[in-house]
Image (cartoon, grey):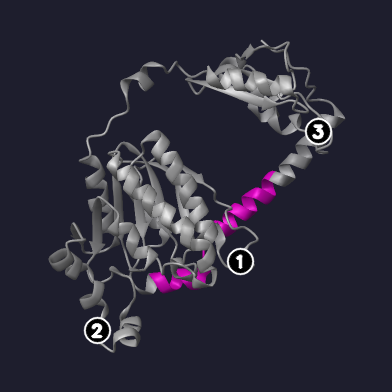
Amino acid sequence: MFQSILNPRSEEYQANVAAMQALVEQLEERQAQVSAGGGEKGAGKMRGRGKLLPRERLELLLDPGTPFLELSPLAAWGMYNDESPCASNITGIGVVSGVECMIFVNDPTVKGGAVYPMTLQKTLRAQTIARENRLPCISLVESAGANLLFQDEIFILGGKSFANQAQMSSMGIPQISLVFGSSTAGGAYVPGMSDYTVFVRGKAYAYLGGPPLVKMATGEETDDETLGGAEMHAQVSGLADYLAEDDRDAIRIGRKIVAQLNRQKPAVCLNRRQAPRDPAYDPEELLGVIPADPKIPFDVREIIIRLVDGSDFFEFKPEYGPTLVCGHAHLNGWPVGILGNNGILFSESANKAAQFIQL
């Protein structure tokens, strides 16, 4: 086992902790800011229409007491004049009816849930994780579609996201959409590419363009319900598999759909897990490991032994290419391979990493 040389009583350690705590506070402030979405103004509009807020929908969808691993919460931070917090979309891994799922939640409090280029970058990353881990995908849909100011950046990314839906569906990875409100253009494609769809009666609409656009293009006058309402899609187009009475009912039906999927983790995964162990070194000391000055080097193994079970790290080729640390360990009981930069990357280090990854 690697022996730590960290001294928690040193002035250097205390300075590192203070610097890192300041950064953690800044991160938490930013995460709280983006979690608020469009703020009270946007939230008030949704509540006035009798709707749940995006994160309220998410909370009801998840199994009580289970964690939600949010992905890319700061996507689009500092971009688009700060008008798209969280890239107007919440993504992450959560447990629904006992099944680990990838969840996508449009945030209509932010520009009506309009899609920005970073929204799609965030979606594509989550889809990649879902495909690699065969996670069912659940989309909570209420979106104005693409922000046309960024149409040139959105076109290819959007097409890729819809292709991913089709490919995952063909692989037997379920695509599920719960439609809560108006979903235009790209917002309508998501349920259109899904295996299961739930529409909220009287509130959910899916069409390429709304009644005003139809009138401008063809001169024909129509209304939301006739053009793309929940009942029309349930009775005429067949797009809506289930009708819900309100947001809560849609989530109830969505959870029931997941429960009927009859999905189980492969036994080979479960059999490889050991009983989790706490690290021998205190993880709270991680804040003091990394220097406040990024120009000052540190040994990445000081981090590893405060993360892995029992601080038990079986290093691969420890004497060769030492500026890239590779090795085996367990994390929360699961076997993992670890690579950690430990200085300048030389050819020997790169060759070692390539060999280790192949193992």
Residue 14's disc is 3
**In this view, 124 is above or below 202:** above
Relative vertical location of residue 76 with respect to residue 219 in this rendering, above or below: above
SS state under label 1: helix
Residue flagged by tag 2: what amino acid is it? Thr
Q: Is residue 52 left or right of residue 307?
A: left
x then y, percent, for residue 338: 59, 23
Disc 1 versus disc 3: nearer the observer: 1
Q: Mark 3, residues whose alpha carbon is within 10 Å: few (<14), some, or many (≥20)?
A: some
Magenta part, dominant SS: helix
Q: Does the magenta stretch include residue 49?
A: no
- Amino acid type, mark 1: Tyr
Which residue is found at the position 43% from the left and 52% from the top? 160
Residue drawn at point x = 32 percent, y = 49 percent: 166
Task: Say whether residue 124 is left or right of residue 48.
Answer: right
Q: Which residue is situated farthest in the right direction here?
A: 11
In front of the other: 288 or 265: 265
Mark 3, secondary structure of its residue: helix
Residue pictured at 82% horizontal, 36% vertical: 15
Q: Name the residue under label 2.
A: 222
